[in-house]
Image (spheres, grey):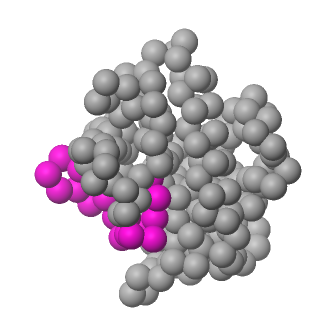
Amino acid sequence: MQTTTLSFDNMHAHGDLLPALFRARKQSFIVRNKWDLPEADGMEFDQYDTPASRWIAVHHLGEVLAGIRLTPTTARVGIYSYMIRDAQRGLLDSIPSNLLDFEAPVAPHIWESSRVFVSQSVPAKMRMRVQASLMQEMIGAGRTLGATQILGLVPAVWSRWIARLQLNAEAAGPKMEIDGTMTQVALMHLSSNLH
């Protein structure tokens, strides 16, 4: 099992890993969760998949097992910035605007994690190991990018796996149902975690 952080600068060195990640996202979000999201050529994508983003893939023998997208909170593409902020600003119909307890930050040291998934094909006995690899790579990539905090709209059970991974995090908004899934915004503090 490998974990790779992809960017527009390095994706050429990883073959079809980025398209494979987008195909795995389609399976997770469109096929399994039945979310109404953009897709093309068997891949799920949206307006936040830009050169400013980074994508983390946990993969084995060409199969993507899990993934995350990281986007700087300073990102701007037309009217869009990052998903949590745009939802708060009322730009996204599918996510309620009251998802955060404070105004969505715009700062170079805060990044957003989104499109977090673990493939259904990952056996239960491997899920914790896959999640740990995903989170450890997110922490490392975040730090490399200058992040001290990561804001993420995650499943509402986040506190269980965050505690197991020894991350320092706090709720940043109310628990809410979005597309049939209980979710909540969490704020993870990278500076206090020394892994």
Stretch of the chain drawn in magenta: 37-55
Percent coordinates x, y for residue 28 in the rendering: 37, 39
Q: Could one spot residue 23 in this view of the protein? A: no
| Residue depicted at x 73% and y 33% | 165
Q: Examine the image and state in which quarter residue 137 appears.
A: top right
| Residue depicted at x 33% and y 54% | 11
The vertical placement of 36 against 57, above or below, is: below
Q: Residue furthest right?
A: 192
Percent coordinates x, y for residue 98 in the rendering: 65, 69
Q: Examine the image and state in which quarter residue 106 appears.
A: bottom right
Query: The N terminus appears in which quarter of the rendering?
Result: top left
Considering depth in this image, is 179 or 137 the residue closer to the camera? Answer: 137
| Residue depicted at x 73% and y 61% | 149
Q: Could one spot residue 135 in this view of the protein? A: yes
Considering depth in this image, is 49 or 101 the residue closer to the camera? Answer: 49
Query: The C terminus appears in which quarter of the rendering?
Result: top right
The vertical placement of 189 against 116, above or below, is: below
**Looking at the magenta stretch, what is its main secondary structure?**
loop
Instruction: Give left or right: position of 144 versus 189.
Output: left
The vertical placement of 35 against 72, above or below, is: above
In the image, is residue 164 part of the stretch drawn in magenta? no
| Residue depicted at x 43% and y 86% | 79
In the image, is residue 46 part of the stretch drawn in magenta? yes
Percent coordinates x, y for residue 80 in the rendering: 45, 80
Q: Residue furthest bottom?
A: 78
